[in-house]
Amino acid sequence: MKITITGSLGNISKPLTTKLVEAGHEVTVISSNGDRAREIAELGAKPAIGSATDIAFLTETFKGSDVVYAMVPNNLSAPDLRKYIGSIGENYAAAIKAAGVNKIVVLSSIGAHLDSGTGPIAGLHDVEEILSQLENVDIKFLRPAYFYTNFYANIDMVKHLGFIGGNYSADTRIIVVHPNDIAEVAADEIQQPFTGRSIRYIASQDSTLSELTTAFGKAIGKPELNWVEFTDEQALEGMIQAGLPAEAARNYVEMGTAIRKGILWEDYDLNKPVPGPTTVENFAAEFAKAYSK
């Protein structure tokens, strides 16, 4: 199969590319960073250097693809994050139509069934809506849970303040997933036949913030590590002080509020997948390695 991968060599796209190349497929990887071209080629894939904002580039790159794996690249500096995410969905839709692609696997998110109140996830709701308007295109929407790797952003907090926290309590439910587990599912979906439009949820563990914090503390040699709940205002101020642009910070606070309310998990609970293999303890070991650097 000829497969085009967006997302450069990120946490999901790199292991996904590796799996597909090893399976014998012809893989093209789109990256906006020319410095990635050599690494992409070393994986056995073809680099395509250009931007997801360039419809002509996307169209030319998508041509001849049996499957396109579409994800929205991060852009935390976007003045309107939801609008930016939706615009990339519009670009993908235009390029898919112009290139004559008839099968796509789309990285969305848990909570994308909601049209508001979820921060950046609302933008992925828009992407699902946009791509669903394509005619004669089979679409598999992947809705992974909250990324384990998002907790790397809390390492400085642990080092300098001695605790970990967010705008939700320690006993809040959190459904987490490892990027490697997402890549495994994405590779499976890309390589198997599917028709129409369907959704697949991806998760590794159903846990609480307290359980995660305990595992992190044990792994880094700080068994006393505690989770601290912030107000929305405190969370916003802390993110901005840490250097996050105000628009991105506002969106992440809103996503935290959705986690606190539990609304992200509602549709997931009706469509629970088989859990991936990465346990909280598995990721805690990775967290400890990152913490020690």
Image (tube, rainbow, N blue to C red):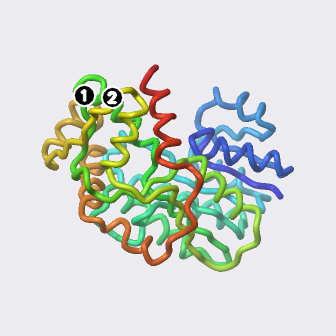
Estimate the spatial distance between the alpha carbons at disc 1 and disc 2, rounded to whole Å: 9 Å
Say which residue appears at 39% left-offset and 65% top-offset: 111
The image quadrant of residue 261 is bottom left
State the image coordinates of residue 180 (x, y, percent, origin top left).
60, 47
Give the left or right position of residue 56, taking residue 128 as reference.
right
- Using the image as rendered, state which of residue 103 and residue 9 is in the foreground: 9
Residue at point 41%, 74% (across, down): 267
Viewer-nearest of labels 1 and 2? 2
Relative placement, left or right, of 267 versus 210 is right
Residue 74 in the image: above or below residue 277: above
Secondary structure beneath label 1 = loop
The quadrant where residue 110 appears: bottom left
Q: Amino acid at mark 2?
A: Lys
Q: Position of residue 87 (x, y in %)?
A: 45, 57
At a point 27% along the width and 53% down the height, the residue shown is: 256
The residue depicted at 40 percent of the width and 60 percent of the height is 123
Q: Which residue is mark 1?
A: 162
Disc 2 secondary structure class = loop
Q: Which mark is residue 240?
A: none
Mark 1 vs 2: CB contact within 8 A: yes
Q: Nearer the viewer, residue 274 or 28?
A: 274
Q: Is residue 9 above or below residue 70?
A: above
Question: Where does the image place residue 226, in percent across and percent down from the top left?
Answer: 25, 38
- Precedes in sequence: disc 1 or disc 2: 1
Read off the residue under disc 2. Answer: 222
Q: Amino acid at mark 1?
A: Gly
* Position in image of residue 130 (x %, y %): 49, 69
